[in-house]
């Protein structure tokens, strides 16, 4: 089951794809600005293994793309905006392998260079059992650290909705640890496969990816001022400015 919400109106559709460890709540500001500017309809799912969506036996970029493609199968003018892992999925959708026609892609903050240490760390996390916390406060504190949504970045709870759930053993993050198995997917081949216009962007303080790295994969690359990895949370108006540029 894929948890999803939508809003706005019109034939133009913006599919908003969050990054690893987050939920669709990170698009709260972007969704508001899309509606304020009357740009079209938005669709924001929790990726499988995250938030309110179900867990799978394994997770791949292609598997995520196939799932979210079903949500926008009938879109006549589709733009996909992906943050971090979501940017990988956006590019996969733009390949036309999943039966949808993508008019444009905005990828925000994708990590494109993976060291062996990075990959080993991701494999170790993916193999760990679920960790339970005695209190909701402990679980939410861990979720904020793990997702990069500390209070300085995301000051209110709207940005972290569905990040933690209560179970028989206490509280845990809603994310399935096995979702870390997607780490190290080949960004270069996904970027080459995209059959549409692509803009890649990053927060100017994002330590996960550099402007130079993004420029090896796209000609249209943007640094977003005064923000870090979660630019869609910190600067939603700047993200929607880029969407308007993409749709123009």
Image (cartoon, rainbow, N blue to C red):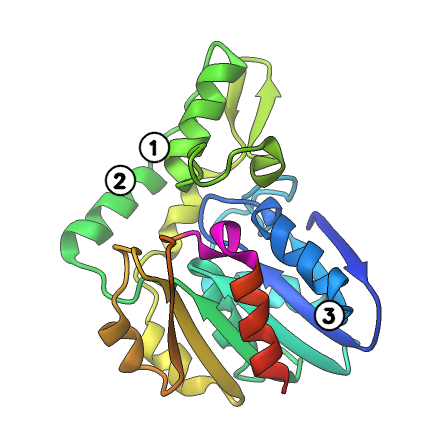
Which mark lies nearer to you, 3 or 1? 3
Figure quadrant of residue 208:
bottom left
Residue, disc 1? 128
* Of residues 182 and 226, the one drawn nearer to the viewer in this rendering: 226
Q: Residue 72 carries which label?
A: 3
Which one is earlier in the sequence, the residue at label 3 or at label 1?
3
Residue 180 seen by the camera: yes
Q: What x and y, as percent, mark residue 226?
A: 37, 55
Which is nearer the eye, 210 or 16? 210
Q: Is the residue 234 above or below the residue 188 in the image? A: above
Tell me the number on the disc at residue 182: none
Nearer to the camera, 116 or 104: 104
Residue denoted by label 2: 124
Could you tell me how far apart the alpha carbons at marks 3 and 1 are, in whole angstroms?
34 Å
Q: Which residue is drawn at 57% across and 43% down?
A: 55
Do the residues bearing badges 2 and 3 touch, measured as CB atoms within 8 Å?
no
The answer to whether residue 73 shows anywhere in this view is no
**Segment tinted magenta in the rendering:** 230-236
Q: In this view, does 228 lie to the left or right of 195?
A: left
* Marks 2 and 1 close (CB-CB < 8 Å): yes
Name the residue at the top extreme: 134
Q: Is the magenta stretch mostly helix, strand or loop?
A: helix
Residue at image location 29% in from the left, 46% down from the top: 122
C-alpha gap between disc 2 and disc 3: 34 Å
39 vs 164: above or below: below
Tell which circle, 2 or 3, labels the residue nearer the N-terminal end: 3
């Amino acid at each position: 089951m894929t948890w999803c919400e939508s809003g706005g109106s019109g034939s133009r559709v913006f599919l908003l794809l969050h990054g690893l460890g987050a939920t669709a709540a990170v698009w709260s500001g972007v969704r508001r600005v899309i509606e304020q500017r009357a740009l079209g309809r938005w669709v924001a799912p929790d990726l499988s293994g995250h938030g309110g969506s179900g867990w799978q036996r394994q997770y791949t970029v292609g598997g995520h793309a196939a799932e979210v493609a079903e949500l926008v199968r009938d879109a006549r003018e589709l733009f996909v905006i992906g943050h971090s892992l979501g940017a990988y999925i956006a590019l996969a959708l733009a390949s036309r392998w999943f039966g949808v026609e993508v008019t444009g892609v905005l990828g925000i903050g994708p990590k494109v260079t993976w060291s062996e240490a990075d990959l080993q760390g991701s494999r170790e996390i993916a193999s760990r059992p679920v960790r339970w916390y005695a209190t909701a406060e402990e679980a939410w504190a861990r979720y904020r650290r793990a997702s990069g949504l500390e209070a300085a970045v995301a000051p209110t709870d709207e940005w972290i909705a569905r990040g933690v759930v209560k179970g028989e053993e206490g509280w845990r993050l809603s994310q399935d640890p096995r979702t870390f198995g997607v780490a190290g997917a080949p960004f270069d081949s996904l970027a080459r496969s995209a059959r549409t216009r692509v803009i890649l962007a990053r927060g100017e303080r994002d330590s996960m990816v550099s402007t130079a790295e993004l420029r090896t994969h796209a000609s249209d690359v943007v640094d977003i001022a005064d923000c870090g990895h979660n630019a869609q949370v910190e600067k939603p108006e700047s993200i929607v400015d880029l969407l308007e540029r993409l749709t123009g």
